[in-house]
Image (cartoon, rainbow, N blue to C red):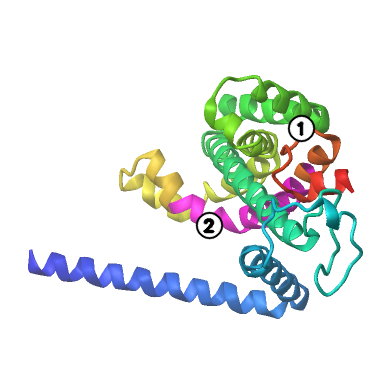
């Protein structure tokens, strides 16, 4: 028993060392791409700004003063004021926080759906693959903006208090997530089709591991790189889609600020 425990601990430590080495390798490769580092720096500055900005600014996002309507940029109001006398800089920072949250959470929904569909299709193949991929192709051919508007309006009609109280944020997250998983599913499927023939998968099968364990513990970690890239691009598309919906009046409803509805009211 002691020998078994020692062997188990040694294997666990070796796995942790391998994981650390892989993370270091990814970071070293990432640092070689100067544009990627620049993009990450800009993104981090943006995140810090929208998270910290509304806290340190002296104005409340809902504070209005009709005597200060349409003030030009000044030291007191660096970006001026809107039609209700609210500080534009404070609302832009607060709106950025909401827009980034919508983009991130919608991609979490899209990842959950896309990774599940892609991994099942790529691992099992055959009829399962055909059915899931044909459904994915159909979803890709549908007009995205039209579906976004229709689904948002349908969700607004549901008498669920949480949907109503969120000012449309939850509805936007769900709709964007449900309509953004297709490219992720195709990437994951392609990775699974190539990885399922590898020797380590055959070894896992010979040990009697379940299909679920093989998918989650052995194949999926090796297919995560294209998923991260797709999720990053998808988050940017989700933010743009939310801004477009809010600009058209179908997104997050005022007085909750987002970049889209602020642009619509400009």
Residue located at (92% from left, 64% from top)? 72
Q: Is residue 106 magenta?
A: no
Residue 227: x %, y % from top left:
62, 52
227 to 29, vertically: above or below: above
151 to 248, vertically: above or below: above
- The circle drawn on residue 111 is none
Q: Secondary structure at mark 2?
A: helix
Horizontal side, residue 16 vs residue 235: left or right? left
Q: Closer to the camera: disc 1 or disc 2? A: 1
For the residues labelled 1 and 2, the Cα–Cα distance comes to: 26 Å
- The answer to which quarter of the image holds residue 40 is bottom right
Residue located at (57% from left, 55% from top)? 224
Residue hosting label 2: 222
Residue located at (62% from left, 28% from top)? 132
Residue 137: x %, y % from top left:
74, 30
Residue 173: x %, y % from top left:
64, 39
In the rendered view of the protein, which quadrant contains the N terminus?
A: bottom left
Q: Which residues are magenta?
A: 218-241
Q: Is residue 238 magenta?
A: yes
Horizontal side, residue 10 vs residue 150: left or right? left
Residue hosting label 1: 140
Number of other residues with Cα within 10 Å of mark 2, as a class: few under 14, some 14 to 19, many 20 or more: few
Q: Pick the residue in front: 195 or 261.
A: 261
């Amino acid at each position: 028993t002691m020998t078994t425990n020692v062997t188990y601990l040694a294997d666990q430590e070796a796995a942790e060392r391998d994981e650390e080495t892989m993370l270091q390798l990814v970071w070293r490769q990432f640092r070689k791409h100067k544009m990627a580092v620049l993009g990450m720096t800009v993104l981090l500055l943006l995140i810090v700004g929208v998270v910290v900005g509304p806290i340190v600014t002296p104005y409340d996002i809902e504070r209005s003063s009709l005597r200060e309507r349409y003030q030009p940029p000044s030291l007191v109001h660096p970006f001026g004021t809107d039609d209700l006398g609210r500080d534009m800089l404070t609302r832009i920072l607060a709106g950025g926080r909401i827009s980034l949250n919508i983009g991130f959470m919608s991609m979490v929904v899209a990842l959950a759906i896309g990774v599940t569909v892609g991994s099942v299709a790529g691992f099992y193949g055959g009829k399962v693959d055909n059915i899931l991929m044909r459904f994915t192709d159909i979803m890709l051919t549908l007009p995205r903006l039209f579906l976004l508007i229709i689904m948002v309006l349908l969700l607004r009609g549901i008498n669920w208090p949480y949907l109503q109280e969120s000012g449309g944020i939850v509805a936007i997250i769900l709709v964007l997530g449900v309509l953004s998983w297709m490219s992720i599913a195709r990437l994951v499927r392609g990775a699974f089709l190539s990885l399922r023939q590898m020797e380590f998968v055959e070894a896992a099968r010979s040990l009697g591991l379940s299909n679920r364990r093989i998918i989650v513990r052995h194949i999926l970690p090796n297919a995560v790189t294209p998923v991260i890239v797709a999720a990053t691009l998808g988050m940017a598309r989700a933010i743009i889609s939310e801004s477009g919906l809010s600009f058209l009046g179908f997104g997050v409803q005022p007085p909750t600020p987002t970049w889209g509805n602020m642009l619509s009211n400009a």
